[in-house]
Amino acid sequence: MSGNPFRRSQARRAAVATRVPTDPELSIKRLCGQSLAAVAISALGMAVAVSVGMTAAAESERLAGDAPATSQGNPDITRANPAPMAQQAERNLAAIQQAEVHQGDQAGSLDVFTRLSRDDTSRNVLRGELDKAVADQQAKRRTEQLTQSSDKAALESGTAVRDSRNKDLMNRTEATRRENERLAEEKRKTGEAQNQGGSNMPAAQPGDGAGLPSGGGAGGASVPMPQGRYSLGARWGAVGSWSRYHTGQDLPAPVGTPLRAAADGVVVTSNGGSWAGTHVVIRHADGSATLYAHMSGASVRPGQTVRGGDMIGAVGMTGRTFGPHLHFEHYPNAATVGNPYTTDDPAAWLARQGVRL
């Protein structure tokens, strides 16, 4: 079939027939429509041409009337003037630009509002930071003022304490001077009485050891100094200017006041520490020890046996002290001498021996 020319020709004619409409009425309607469209386009073109011609003529007459005259009295047709349409176009363009500017201002107002809001937020954040900085500065200033006030109070307190101690030291020094003069006078009188062979020496009091040679005390417990020759100072355990607490019993007395052994024992090496100055340590039969600090001098030596009430030295101001006194300590364990925080209350220890300070 594909090779028959006759049949191929028939197929082509059938295809053409299907594409071209065969209805005469449909063809006439289409032709009329096309003709009407052409007539309308032609009429519109003629109207535009007539309008343009009339406009050009009117503009020429206006230009002829508006043009300035030349030196010969003829109008200057070489001057360029904007056409009315161009002027109208310019006015329209200006109106459009003005409308755009107005719209831009309206839109920009929102931007300005947003920007102002952001500026307010930024100012609030900045104000918060400034307030915080001012508060920190004020707190720092108050801290400095409190520190200065505390330093001033500490300085005034330290000055008052120092002045009080200096005054007390002067009073004690004066009392010591008078006591030394009294002792010297008594010694002079005693020497005169001995030279005269009289028997008016003061009798020895029990526990006092007066007139007894070293090692010849009455025995038993005894107060470290003769009664009435001392006063009670800082007690054991008191809290004050010491590192932790007071480690003994202070007995203020004039320099040179005789010191006595508080109980029977053996004098051992003075190993209490440099703070004690000249001092004596006595080991007792119960394994405890007593320490006598700040002495002006010792009259016993290590290895010597003493009895309660024996004279062992005299009150002084050696070592770390602010005035003449005896610092009296009791160690329950004689092996811990040198560590003052292993002591106990010496007044209580004496009370257990039947002696009261």
Image: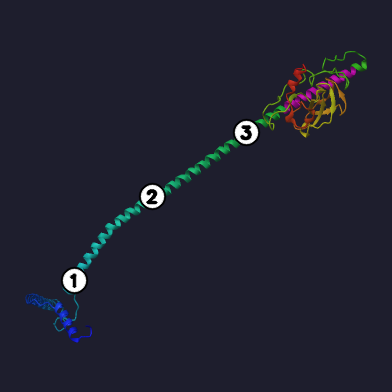
**Quadrant position of residue 251:** top right
**Which residue has dot 1 on it?**
87
Q: Is residue 95 above or below residue 164?
A: below
Image coordinates for residue 23, horizontal then vertical, percent:
8, 76
* Label 2 close to label 3 by CB (< 8 Å): no
Is 282 drawn above or below residue 31 in the view shown?
A: above
The reply to whether the magenta stretch includes residue 314 is no
Nearer the observer, disc 2 or disc 1? Answer: 2
Q: Main secondary structure of the magenta part?
A: helix
The kind of secondary structure element at disc 3 is helix
Instruction: Please state which amino acid type lies under the numbered disc 2.
Output: Thr
**The residue tagged with tag 1: helix, strand or loop?**
helix
Instruction: Indicate the quadrant containing the N terminus: top left, top right, bottom left or bottom right.
Output: bottom left
Of residues 191 and 236, the one nearer the viewer is: 236
Task: Please identify the residue farthest to the top as the structure is shown.
Answer: 199
Numbered tag placed on residue 156 in the rendering: 3
> Foreground residue, 48 or 185?
48
Q: Secondary structure at mark 2?
A: helix
Q: Which residues are magenta?
A: 169-192
